[in-house]
Image (cartoon, grey):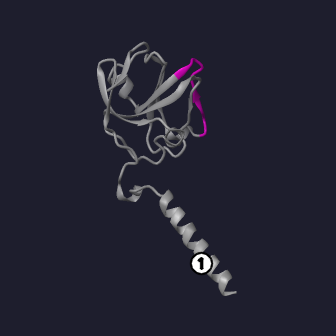
């Protein structure tokens, strides 16, 4: 019986450790952002400070749970290859513009002012895209992003 209690206590400690390890380093309640907007992305004539989502886990998380971004901040999604890309507004807190970019680093499609209330609707572009950029709603128009603009990450 003592062995069983020891095993249960050890398993409980492992479970608590696993839960702690899964939590972000900074909680949302502390006001910390889960992303660091440290890279420069040139889209046409505008430079955005972006975080890069280049792993499956990062792409799945996206901007879910983020409260806000600065005016020229964004999340740049990098996929392993070009394909039809879809996005939704699960757990989003603010509206965004979504910009799809092909493997030649050119803007191929945009949807402006996608609100959190659209969830579970899915936004898809049928043309093959390898990259996407999520920016604050209205920024695509305000910065004059156009289909065909060149995109480069610095």
Residue 94 image point, x, y percent = 43, 41
Report the front residue among 121 and 13.
13
Quadrant placement of the C terminus? top left
Q: Residue at x 59, y 23 (%)?
A: 84
Q: Would you say 135 lies left or right of 120 here?
A: left
Residue 97 image point, x, y percent = 44, 30
Magenta span: predominant SS is: loop
Q: Is residue 114 one of those drawn in magenta?
A: no
Quadrant placement of the N terminus? bottom right
Q: Would you say 10 lies left or right of 105 here?
A: right
Residue 18 image point, x, y percent = 54, 62
The residue identified by callout 1 is 9
Report the front residue among 93 and 64.
64
Q: Secondary structure at mark 1?
A: helix
Count of numbered circles on the image? 1
Indicate whether 69 appears above or below 123: below
Report the front residue among 42 and 17.
17
Part of the protein shown in magenta: 120-129
Location of residue 90 (image quadrant): top right
Q: Would you say 76 lies left or right of 83 here?
A: left
Residue 89 image point, x, y percent = 53, 39
Location of residue 35 (image quadrant): top left
Q: Is residue 123 one of those drawn in magenta?
A: yes
**Farthest right residue?**
1
């Amino acid at each position: 019986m003592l062995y069983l209690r020891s095993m249960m206590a050890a398993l409980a400690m492992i479970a608590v450790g696993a839960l702690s390890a899964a939590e972000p380093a900074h909680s949302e309640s502390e006001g910390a952002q889960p992303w660091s907007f440290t890279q420069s992305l040139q889209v046409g004539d505008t430079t955005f400070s972006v975080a890069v989502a280049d792993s499956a886990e990062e792409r799945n998380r996206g901007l879910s749970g983020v409260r806000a971004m600065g005016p020229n901040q964004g999340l740049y999604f990098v996929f392993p290859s070009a394909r039809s890309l879809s996005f939704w507004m699960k757990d989003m807190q603010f509206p965004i513009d979504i910009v799809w970019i092909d493997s030649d680093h050119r803007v191929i499609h945009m949807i402006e002012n996608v609100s959190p209330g659209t969830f579970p609707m899915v936004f898809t572009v049928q043309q093959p895209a390898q990259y996407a950029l999520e920016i604050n709603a209205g920024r695509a128009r305000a910065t004059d992003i156009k289909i065909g603009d060149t995109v480069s990450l610095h």
